[in-house]
Image (cartoon, rainbow, N blue to C red):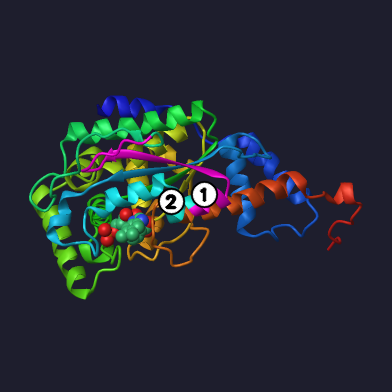
Amino acid sequence: MLTTILEAAGQIASPVEESIRQAELRLNSLTKPPGSLGRLEALAVRLAGISARPQPEYTKRTVVVMAADHGVCCEGVSAFPQEVTLQMAHNFLGGGAGVNVLARQAGAEVKLVDIGMNGEIEHPLLVNRKIRRGTDNMAQGPAMSREDAGRTVLAGVQIAQEAVKSGTDIFVTGEMGIGNTTASAAVLCALEGLSAEAAVGRGTGIDDERLARKTVVVERALRVNRPDAADPLDVLAKVGGLEIAGLAGLILGAAALQTPVILDGFISGAAAMVATALAPEARAYLIASHVSGEQGHKLMLERLGLEPLLDLGLRLGEGTGGVLCLHLIEAVCRIMSEMATFESAGISGAAEA
Ligand SMILES: O=C(O)c1ccc[n+]([C@@H]2O[C@H](COP(=O)([O-])O)[C@@H](O)[C@H]2O)c1
Ligand SMILES: Cc1cc2nc[nH]c2cc1C
């Protein structure tokens, strides 16, 4: 299984240097003081390299929302009951969730994937890739088998491949899963050797008492399972989640097809940690949309070496922060294609020193 995953990862090429160089030249020819568009300029250059074009355009934007359940919920780690995962899945399909609203505004399509919910939904818009009905309680043993973790990553790779074949040229990662901030914190601790205290946050809004319990649960999960930091599939299987594994695969599949991936919040970040542990080259294809309000996300992004574009205190998940950044990406693309140059507008360049 790992061999097949690493085969997919082995196809990830570096961003295209020539497109990067052309984008830098173009930015410096536009009617503005050099560098005056700040970090948007760095974003323009990165997108050029990823998409192998100095003036990229993204016309088919897909938010992949992976939904899954977590056995660890029975430890009382969330502010909401587990059945909210399935109830929210109905909400996504009906177009009423936060991400649906923001995706409509940003011209993106929401693709809901059942990668491992406890319950069943029959709906024409639902992509059914259920690997199993939720994970087991990681505080008592592995969340899932190594085989299930591998199959889930491969399902994510395949979803990316199918979407790109149907025209998707940019992805946003999204997820829904009550309990998944516990799994994400455990993955962060396992891969980076951090204490539970540094990684655990309030998720859906737990009080101090539950936060203390959640921290103990993550500590216990790490002690009981002893995940191997050098083996990302082992980490996923022992303390991960199905949506985390699926999104890790989506990232690898997208990167192998030179397609940018906008990361949403803490859970998407955990998937990115796994993906980059499997294939460090995938990092070049990742754009961090925002730093989430979830404690631990800032540290996670630092470890990933990614600078978030926004800091709005978002902690909804679903892909909401990622979709918001599509507006910034659209802005950058328009700057690159529509802005006049010093030459075309007849404007004098900077004075000689
Ligand atoms: O993306 C984030 O940073 C984020 C931070 C906190 C909560 N969430 C969402 O809330 C759910 C998980 O919270 P919890 O408390 O049940 O672990 C899950 O459905 C996530 O989409 C998401
Ligand atoms: C209502 C609700 C919506 C969500 N969306 C993502 N995670 C969520 C958690 C809850 C509880």
Task: Tell whether 150 sits left or right of 164.
Answer: left
Can residue 306 be seen here? The reply is no
Per the model, the C-alpha gap separating discs 1 and 2 is 9 Å
| Most foreground residue, 15 or 344 | 344
Q: Position of residue 148 (x, y in %)?
A: 20, 33
> What span is colored magenta in the figure?
101-123
Report the residue marked by disc 2.
319
Secondary element under disc 2, as helix, strand or loop, is loop
Query: Mark 2 is on which residue type?
Result: Gly
**Left or right of 182, for residue 41:** right
Foreground disc of the pair 1, 2: 1
The kind of residue on which mark 1 rests is Ala
Quarter holding the C terminus? bottom right
Instruction: Give the number of the disc on residue 103.
Output: 1
x then y, percent, for residue 199: 27, 62
Specify whether residue 19 is painted magenta. no
Give percent across and percent down for residue 314: 43, 64
Q: Which SS class for mark 1? A: helix
Q: Is residue 104 magenta?
A: yes
Q: Earlier in the sequence, mark 1 or mark 2?
A: 1
Q: Is residue 339 left or right of residue 343?
A: left
Residue appearing at x 23%, y 39% in the figure: 231
User: Does residue 209 appear left or right of residue 13 in this picture?
Assistant: left
Tell me, for residue 67, which label it has, or none.
none
Please say if the residues under marks 1 and 2 sit with CB atoms less than 8 Å apart.
yes
Front residue of 160 and 320: 320
Closest to the observer, 108 or 287: 108
Quick one: quadrant of the N terminus? top left
